[in-house]
Image (cartoon, helix red, strand yellow):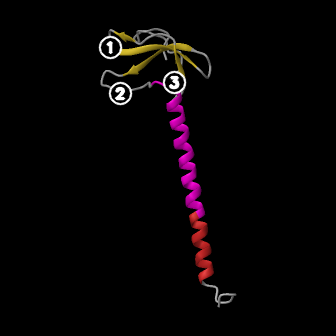
């Protein structure tokens, strides 16, 4: 994040973290010297404002739109991953109990 639209000669405000939420304050503008699309933003976590690059001139995307749907999708993926891990643990436990019961030769069924 820099203090001005032009990167060269601009002062760095701070580094933006991966998955950090930024509020767009203006429309995207093309920085003419390097041909990069940049936008003025405000960081949610500390309120600092500055310009960030949306995408590089080779097409690398640095910033994506954040929607309620995207937030839901990310949350759902996280929950499903936790559920998958819990299912694996439960399956291991059940398999261990089944193996334990196979070795028992005394009981009401024998």
- Does the stretch in magenta take in 66? yes
Q: Which residue is at the front of the view, 52 or 86?
A: 86
Q: Residue 23: x, y in percent?
A: 54, 18
Disc 3 from disc 1: Cα separation: 20 Å
Q: Which residue in the protein does label 1 denote?
A: 34
Mark drawn on residue 16:
3
What residue do we see at 33% from left, 9% from top?
Answer: 32
Q: Residue 98: x, y in percent?
A: 59, 76
Name the main secondary structure of what is drawn in magenta: helix
Q: Which residues are magenta?
A: 65-90
Disc 1 from disc 2: Cα separation: 14 Å
Which quarter shows the C terminus?
bottom right
Category of crowding for the residue at label 3, using alpha-carbon neighbours closer than 10 angstroms: few (below 14), some (14–19), many (at least 20):
few
Disc 2 from disc 3: Cα separation: 16 Å
Q: Is residue 92 left or right of residue 63?
A: right
Category of crowding for the residue at label 2, using alpha-carbon neighbours closer than 10 angstroms: few (below 14), some (14–19), many (at least 20):
few
What residue do we see at 36% from left, 10% from top?
Answer: 31
Q: Which residue in the protein does label 2 denote?
A: 60
What residue do we see at 57% from left, 66% from top?
Answer: 92
Give the image quarter of residue 30. Answer: top left
Q: Residue 53: x, y in percent?
A: 42, 18
**If you read the primary sequence from the N terminus, does the residue marked by circle 2 or circle 3 appear first?**
3
**If you read the primary sequence from the N terminus, does the residue marked by circle 1 or circle 2 appear first?**
1
Q: Are marks 1 and 2 in contact (CB under 8 Å)?
A: no
Q: Residue 36: x, y in percent?
A: 35, 16
């Amino acid at each position: 994040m820099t203090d001005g639209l032009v990167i060269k000669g601009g002062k760095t405000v701070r580094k933006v973290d991966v998955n950090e939420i930024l509020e767009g304050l203006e429309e995207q503008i093309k920085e003419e010297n390097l041909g990069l699309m940049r936008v003025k933003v405000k960081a949610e976590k500390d309120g600092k404002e500055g310009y960030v690059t949306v995408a590089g001139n080779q097409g690398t995307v640095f910033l994506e739109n954040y929607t309620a749907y995207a937030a839901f999708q990310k949350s759902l993926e996280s929950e499903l991953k936790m559920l998958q891990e819990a299912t694996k643990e439960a399956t291991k436990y059940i398999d261990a109990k089944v193996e334990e019961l196979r070795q028992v030769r005394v009981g009401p069924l024998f």
